[in-house]
Image (cartoon, coloured by chain):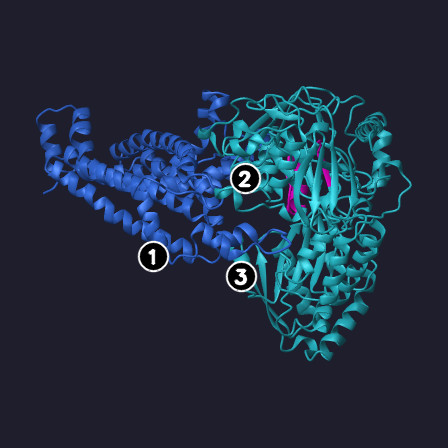
Chain colours: A cyan, B blue
């Protein structure tokens, strides 16, 4: 564990040398590794969790695939030595909120990923929890987790902490802050968005100068993934008194620090800039001197800024394949990088309502649908088959390669599946869908709408007497209000998965779970999930999670349609982005800001 | 005049009370509220106690009580705190309003600089080729939507020349660049105002130029420019000023879209976000600000009539 970062750096340099030094040969290797072109209508080999490959470039099956935009050729992106210095310009979110990492976790995360550090980070290759500000940890008893701080780390040289050392009191306080355990007054006490990461934790206490102890009311296997969430960034204890309204007064220990006066209240809502922290504890990082964030909301303006070279990096969230291809075709030297398992799309049944309370009807709908057509239709080849647990949870999920072979998902058995679907629906009393008059509640006109229209069209072909109306809500509050009122038969939405697989299943499927919108309840499943949450050993926990996934495939309260890859486009000279690999630390497009410390720009 | 002014100012209060009532009710009857927007998308293990949150935010009160509470705060100069971010609405609006004022101010100057020459020239050269060209230009300006013009000026140069106009540049990184970054969005925003004003100025100028007093002025030997500026234009201005006041409000509405496209962090952008988040306090605060602006503008317009045409007696 101690040499983790050195190993990380070494492996990244090796990767860079491989990419840069191999020149034309690298293109061929990567082409073989990445497999598919953007036009072949098949998920690329890198898109599947367990894709077999004998090439070195694909040694990590989940590594981001780098392609030359606008062609099937992957780019030879890196030079032998990464250049130091220069300014990277990201398209990103603006300072539109108080930059409070606990109450507006996702929106504040780009800034905090640059200026802050998490307690733990997941290893990109093994997906195991690795060190960051916490260097070692142990669980001496089920009700206790002991965290040992990395020595020699300092906060940024900003008043009032003025570059002092990071202490165990800071870390304990910050963990309590994220967990919603601090006694705060006013609006700071409203929402602690990552509080569920700390399920089972009573309080965090500084037990000595370099140790923090988490007192647990119940054992939780989720705590370590929770501490490695990209949104959980550590702050000095003074920060809570300072508050988060003034963006000039945000203090972290991360690779970049705020440029004094970079923002002022008059420009609230504007973009931001950070400069390299010369005292950063990860030796040799960051590589660039400065990062500017440009705030561009409109997709056409984003594309124009990229083509004109005004921005170096553009993340592409929920963009249709046709849009990405058109953008890439305009400037072929752009680098398109995608990484799997980002955004989970679902069809949720209103399971409390007839006929969706009948497992046969749900299963018939599931078997009748063509998931490949849905994924290809919107995302081209930038998607992955997914079961009840998104394949992002590489250690715990049924891998997408296995999901792809199961009835319902398997394109090769679609004819048989449809025949079975017809039989099941007839047995349930709805031959050819007769008597089924359904409404789909859809969030926005993006991919969810594309999925819903394809579901409607596919169901009409299989069950000609079934009707389906589309109710699209572009406004999130209206969508969630109708979701809460259960005014739907099918609900189309999607989400970035949380960092811990057990918490993901608990939230989505357990009785009373926060994301269990249709109020599905299966007491047997609840027991399995409770056991998994309390199980601290990986193997028995994995068995329990596999059991839960099988139950959900049999019962099918949700249909996991697929997960969309995340993608970003880089200017030709930008190097060093390997792509995050899994949810939480790598599941959201915001998380890519955590990788800025590795990135460089050659021109 | 001072009595008239006082009466008009006194009318501000009931008018604002009505505007506020309308907004307070309207945003609350929209489907979904701030708690739907805030917590529904989170993977909490247990649902946040909705009632507790509603109580904390004062949303469990009947609407009329919420209205009374807010109106009372307002009278004390307190616009409240954002339900979403906890910031004071005044601080949120403060920085944003300035940027929108800059944008719309530049747009207004641009519109006036285009509208008057075009309108006057078109009237003076009635039914000439120039007149037809200028009128065609104004029709284009009126019919092309702002969002379309804004998108095209960004996308087409990017596709054709790998160049795009500068997006928003904050003042701390250089005032000239900041002003330059506002010119194009302001120009697009000015397009509709300029063309609608130009058409009205042309029509009014043609009407006034045919009046007897213009003929008399000419007969008395007043110079052409004197007739134009002192007699014709001044008399043509009353409906133009009225339209200008109405169009200024439209200018602020148009800024919502243009700000989004050009990445300008102004009031329009804030309003869109606040509506989407059901941030009632922020929506109300921005609406109050716009309401006050409109009322003040109307007052200024009414007062200007007397100056423009002494036959109009304010208060009579």
Q: Identify the residue under disc 2.
A: A297
Q: Is disc 3 surrounded by few (<14), some (14 to 19) or many (20+) residues within 10 Å?
A: some
Residue A233 or B9: which is nearer the viewer?
A233
Q: Give the image location of residue A171, x and y in percent.
A: 66, 34
Instruction: Identify whether A191 is placed above or below A174.
Output: below
Chain at tag 1: B
Q: Identify the residue under disc 3.
A: A482
Q: Marks 3/1: CA distance?
A: 25 Å
Instruction: Identify whether A417 is placed above or below B308.
Output: below
The stretch in magenta equals A314-338
Mark earlier in primary sequence (2, 3): 2
Q: Identify the residue under disc 1.
A: B64
Q: Indicate the secondary structure of the residue bearing disc 3.
A: helix
Q: Quadrant of residue B205?
A: top left
Q: Residue at x 38, y 55 (%)?
A: B26
Q: Is A334 situated left or right of B264 in this image? A: right
Q: Is B306 situated left or right of B95 in this image? A: left
Q: Quadrant of residue A490?
A: bottom right
């Amino acid at each position: 564990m101690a040499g983790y970062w050195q190993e990380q750096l070494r492996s990244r340099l090796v990767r860079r040398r491989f990419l840069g030094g191999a020149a034309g040969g690298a293109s061929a290797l990567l082409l073989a590794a990445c497999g598919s072109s953007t036009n072949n209508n098949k998920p690329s080999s890198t898109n599947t969790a367990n894709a077999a490959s004998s090439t070195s470039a694909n040694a990590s099956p989940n590594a981001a695939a780098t392609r030359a935009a606008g062609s099937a050729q992957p780019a030879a992106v890196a030079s032998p030595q990464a250049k130091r210095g220069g300014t990277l310009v990201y398209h990103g979110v603006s300072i539109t909120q108080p930059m409070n990492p606990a109450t507006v976790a996702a929106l504040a995360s780009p800034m905090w990923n640059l200026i802050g550090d998490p307690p733990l980070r997941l290893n990109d290759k093994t997906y195991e929890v690795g060190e960051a500000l916490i260097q070692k940890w142990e669980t001496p008893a089920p009700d206790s987790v002991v965290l040992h701080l990395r020595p020699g780390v300092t906060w940024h040289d900003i008043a009032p902490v003025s570059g002092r050392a990071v202490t165990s009191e800071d870390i304990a306080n910050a963990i309590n802050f994220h967990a919603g355990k601090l006694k705060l007054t006013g609006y700071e006490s409203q929402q602690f968005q990552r509080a569920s990461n700390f399920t089972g934790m009573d309080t965090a206490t500084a037990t000595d100068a370099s140790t923090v102890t988490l007192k647990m009311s119940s054992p939780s296997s989720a705590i370590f993934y929770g501490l490695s969430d990209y949104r959980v960034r550590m702050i000095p204890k003074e920060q809570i008194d300072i508050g988060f309204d003034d963006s000039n007064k945000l203090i972290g220990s991360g690779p970049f620090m705020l440029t004094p006066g970079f923002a002022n209240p008059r420009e609230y809502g504007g973009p931001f800039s950070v400069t390299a922290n010369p005292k950063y504890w990860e030796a040799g990082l960051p590589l660039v001197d400065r990062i500017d964030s440009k705030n561009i909301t409109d997709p056409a303006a984003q594309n124009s800024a990229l083509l004109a070279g005004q921005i170096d990096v553009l993340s592409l969230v929920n963009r249709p394949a046709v849009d990405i291809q058109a953008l890439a075709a305009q400037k072929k030297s752009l680098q398109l990088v995608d990484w799997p398992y980002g955004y989970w799309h679902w069809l949720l049944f209103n399971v409390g309502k007839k006929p969706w309370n009948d497992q046969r009807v749900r299963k018939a709908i599931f078997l009748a649908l063509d998931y490949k057509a849905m994924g290809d239709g919107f995302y081209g080849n930038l998607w992955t088959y997914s079961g009840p647990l998104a394949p992002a949870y590489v250690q715990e999920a049924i891998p997408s390669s296995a999901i792809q072979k199961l009835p319902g998902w398997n394109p090769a058995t679609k004819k048989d599946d449809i025949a079975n679907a017809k039989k099941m629906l007839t047995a349930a009393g709805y031959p050819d869908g007769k008597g089924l008059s359904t409404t789909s509640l859809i969030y926005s006109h993006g991919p969810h709408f594309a999925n819903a229209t394809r579901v409607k069209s596919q169901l009409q072909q299989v069950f000609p007497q079934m009707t389906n109306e589309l109710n699209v809500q572009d406004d999130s509050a209206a969508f969630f209000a109708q979701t809460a009122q259960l005014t739907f038969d099918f609900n189309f939405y999607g989400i970035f998965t949380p960092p811990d697989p057990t918490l993901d299943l608990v939230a989505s499927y357990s009785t009373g779970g926060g994301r269990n919108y249709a109020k599905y309840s299966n007491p047997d499943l609840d027991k399995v999930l409770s056991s998994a949450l309390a199980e601290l050993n990986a193997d028995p926990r994995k068995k329990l999670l596999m059991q839960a996934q099988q139950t959900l495939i049999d019962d099918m309260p949700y249909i996991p349609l697929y997960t969309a890859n995340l993608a970003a486009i880089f200017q030709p000279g930008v190097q060093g982005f390997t792509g995050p690999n899994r949810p939480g630390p790598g599941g959201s497009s915001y998380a890519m800001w955590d990788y800025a410390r590795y990135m460089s720009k050659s021109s | 005049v001072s009595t008239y002014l006082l009466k008009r100012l006194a009318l501000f209060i009931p008018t604002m009370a009505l505007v506020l009532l309308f907004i307070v009710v309207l945003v609350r009857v929209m489907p979904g509220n701030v708690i739907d927007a805030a917590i529904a998308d989170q993977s909490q293990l247990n649902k946040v106690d909705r009632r507790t949150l509603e109580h904390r935010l004062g949303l469990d009160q009947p609407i009329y009580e919420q209205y009374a509470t807010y109106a009372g705060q307002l009278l004390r100069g307190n616009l409240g705190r954002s339900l979403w971010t906890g910031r004071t609405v005044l601080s949120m609006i403060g920085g944003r309003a300035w940027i929108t004022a800059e944008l719309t101010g530049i747009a207004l100057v641009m519109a006036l600089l285009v509208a008057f020459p075009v309108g006057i020239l078109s009237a003076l050269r009635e039914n000439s080729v120039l007149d037809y060209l200028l009128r065609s230009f104004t029709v284009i300006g009126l019919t092309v939507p702002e969002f379309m013009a804004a998108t095209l000026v960004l996308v087409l140069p990017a596709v054709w020349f790998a160049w795009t106009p500068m997006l928003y540049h904050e003042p701390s990184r250089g005032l000239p660049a900041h002003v330059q970054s506002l010119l194009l969005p302001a120009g697009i925003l000015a397009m509709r105002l300029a063309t609608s004003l130009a058409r009205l100025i042309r029509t009014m100028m043609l009407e006034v130029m045919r009046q007897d007093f213009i003929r008399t002025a000419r007969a008395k030997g007043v110079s052409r420019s004197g007739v134009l500026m002192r007699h014709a234009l001044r008399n043509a201005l009353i409906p133009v000023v009225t339209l200008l006041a109405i169009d200024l409000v439209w200018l602020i509405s148009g800024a919502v879209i243009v700000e989004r496209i050009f990445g300008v962090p102004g009031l329009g952008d804030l309003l869109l976000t606040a509506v989407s988040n059901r941030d009632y306090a922020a929506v109300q605060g921005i609406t109050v600000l716009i309401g006050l602006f409109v009322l003040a503008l109307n007052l200024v317009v009414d007062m200007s009539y007397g100056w423009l045409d002494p036959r109009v007696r304010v208060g009579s």
